[in-house]
Image (tube, grey):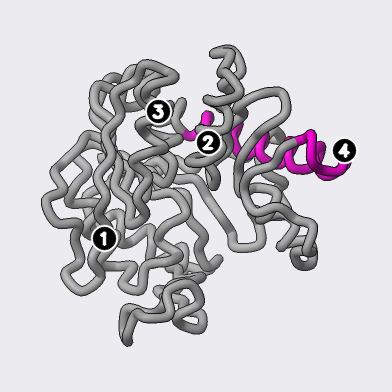
Amino acid sequence: MDLRKYRLSETRVREGAGCLNYQPFVLSDDVCTGVAYSWISTADGGRSQNVPDFVLDRRTCDGRLWERFWDANRRLAAMYDDFVDAIAQHVPRGTMLDVACNNGYFLIRGAQRGMSECVGYDQGDYSRSVAFLNSVLGTKAQFHHAAYDSWKHEIAGCGKYDVVIASNIMQHISDPLYFLNFLGSRARKALFLFTGMGETDQYLVYYSAPNRFYKDRPFPIGFDNDVGLSRGLLWESLKQLGFSHIIELPYRETWLPRSFLNLGCQKALLCLR
C-alpha cells in the first residue's frame, strides 16, 4: 500500500515505521516495509546477516538491497490488492473479518473497496498500526487484541461477518480442522484462504517440529509452523462447511515469484456459499 500521495511529514513517516512492519507499506520515497524480501531470500538459500527484517530506509542501506526489498514487497502488495479486489467483487459492501490481521492491510483495503465494516483480530497488539492507517486514510477499521484459542477452538466474543479472511495463518494453528470449522462458523457468505497445502487427494494433515515460534505452548497446541491440510482434505472440509463453490485465483506475474509460492503449494482460495 503506497502512502506517498498523503505526503507524510518526516515525523509521521517515523511514526509509521515504528508501528508498521510485516505487511507491505510505502511511507515515503525512502522508507518502506514488508516481509516479502525476507521470505524470498530465505527460500533462495537462507538469510544473510544483511537482510533486514521488515523496515528499510534507502538512505541507510545498499542500493541493490533497496531495489530487491522494494520489488519483493511491491509484488506482495499487488498480490494482496488482487485478493481484496476478488473478495469485493463477489461480496460487495459486505462486512469483513480478518482473523490474523497483523498491521491491518486487508482491513484498510477492504474499507477502501467499499466493505461496510472491517474488523480484525490478532494475538499481537496492532492497535497502533490500525489507528495510524485510519488516521492517514480516513478509514474506520476496527482492531481487537485477541487470538484464536486452540484449546477452545474459538476467538471469544467474535461475531459473524459476510466474509472471513485467513491469510497465511492456518500454517501456525495446531488444530487446523477445528480452526477451519471456526472460520466457517463466522462466515455468512464467503471465506478467503491464502494457505499452503499438500498436493494429494488423500485426506492428510501435515505437521513439522513443534515450538518453533512459541516456546511455551504445551502439547498438543505447540505445533506452530508448516501445519497444513492436503488438497483432498481441505476441499472436503470446505464442502462439509457449506462452501459449494471454490474459486482458485489464477497466478499473476505481478505477484511473488511462482517458484516461491510453489514451495508450499500456496493457493489463494475464495470459497463461496
Q: Mark 2 and mark 3: span between their CA atoms?
A: 11 Å
Q: How many discs mark residues in the rendered view?
A: 4
Residue that label 4 marks: 63
- What amino acid type is highlighted by mark number 4? Gly
Q: Nearer the viewer, mark 4 or mark 3?
A: 4
Say above or below: 51 vs 83.
below
Of 239 and 211, the residue lying toward us: 211
Locate the C terminus by quadrant: top left
Q: Of the two numbered discs 1 and 2 on the same chain, state the one appearing first in sequence.
A: 2
Q: Position of residue 182 (x, y in %)?
A: 21, 57
Please state if 35 lies on the left or on the right of 269 as rendered: right
Q: Of the two numbered discs 4 and 1 on the same chain, state the one appearing first in sequence.
A: 4
Describe the element under mark 4 as helix, strand or loop.
helix
Locate the N terminus by quadrant: top right
Please state if 50 lies on the left or on the right of 130 as rendered: right
- What amino acid type is highlighted by mark number 3? Ile
Labelled pair 2, 3 in contact (Cβ < 8 Å): no
Labelled pair 1, 2 in contact (Cβ < 8 Å): no
Callout 4 crowding tier (Cα within 10 Å): few <14, some 14–19, many ≥20:
few
- What amino acid type is highlighted by mark number 2? Tyr
Describe the element under mark 2 as helix, strand or loop.
helix
Residue that label 3 marks: 108
Residue that label 1 marks: 148
Q: Mark 4 and mark 1: span between their CA atoms?
A: 41 Å
Q: Nearer the viewer, mark 2 or mark 4?
A: 4
Describe the element under mark 3 as helix, strand or loop.
helix
